Image (tube, rainbow, N blue to C red):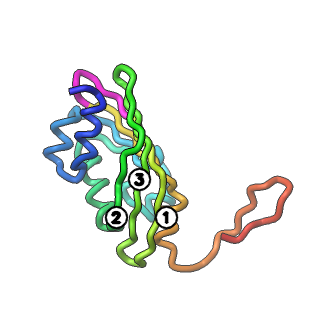
Amino acid sequence: MTPIDVVEGILADPQNLANVKRHTTPDVTYVSLNYDNPELKRVMPWCGTGCGPEAIARTFVDAARYWAVESFDLGTVFGSGPHVAIFGKFTYRSTVLRKRVTTPFAVYAHINDGLCNYLQFMEDTFATTASFRSGGAWLIKSDPDGEEVSV
């Protein structure tokens, strides 16, 4: 299998632990959305850095409890040596509030001896978290010359 085949194999059935184990090292590092953000972890408990194939499968099982996956499209896939990158988009609908969101995603993986030993998944976390928003507002001051914005 090529490094691209390995990553596509994981993403073909990421909730299936046997499938994930088939394509990863026992100590694979998995980064979901950030390295460590306790505040975001309160909203999406799978966020952060995990170790082992179980961390990957658990993330996708948990995410499927929070959202119904309406589409998951791999767009551009490329690799160079042991490095693989995927850029695509997905559409999720939150299971509690039924809010729909479409966001780009990016995956980076490192393959060693035919197995993935590092996998990182990124998305527009602001958009996906907004699918859980039930009320309230954030007051944000980002523009050094601008006003505060209510979101």
User: From the viewer's perspective, is the residue at label 3 or at label 2 nearer?
Assistant: 2
Residue 70 in percent (x, y) is at 34, 64
Residue 13 in percent (x, y) is at 21, 49
Which residue is labeled 1 in the image? 129
Q: Amino acid at mark 1?
A: Thr
Q: How many numbered tags mark residues here?
A: 3
Snapshot quadrant of residue 107: top left
State the SS at label 2.
strand
Residue drawn 45% across the image and 74% down it: 99
Distance between the alpha carbons at the discs numbered 3 and 2: 21 Å
Q: Which residues are magenta?
A: 109-115
User: From the viewer's perspective, is the residue at label 2 or at label 1 nearer?
Assistant: 2
| Label disc, if present, on residue 18 of the rendered structure | none
Q: Amino acid at mark 2?
A: Glu
Snapshot quadrant of residue 61: bottom left
Q: Amino acid at mark 3?
A: Cys
User: From the viewer's perspective, is the residue at label 1 or at label 3 nearer?
Assistant: 1
| Label disc, if present, on residue 47 of the rendered structure | 3
Residue 58 in percent (x, y) is at 26, 54
State the SS at label 3.
loop
- Quadrant where the C terminus sits is bottom right
Q: Is residue 49 magenta?
A: no
State the SS at label 1.
helix
Distance between the alpha carbons at the discs numbered 1 and 3: 12 Å
Q: Which mark sits nearer the N-terminus, 2 or 1?
A: 2
- Quadrant where the N terminus sits is top left
Residue drawn 33% across the image and 63% down it: 69
Residue drawn 44% across the image and 42% down it: 87
Q: Main secondary structure of the magenta part?
A: strand
Which residue is labeled 2 in the image? 70
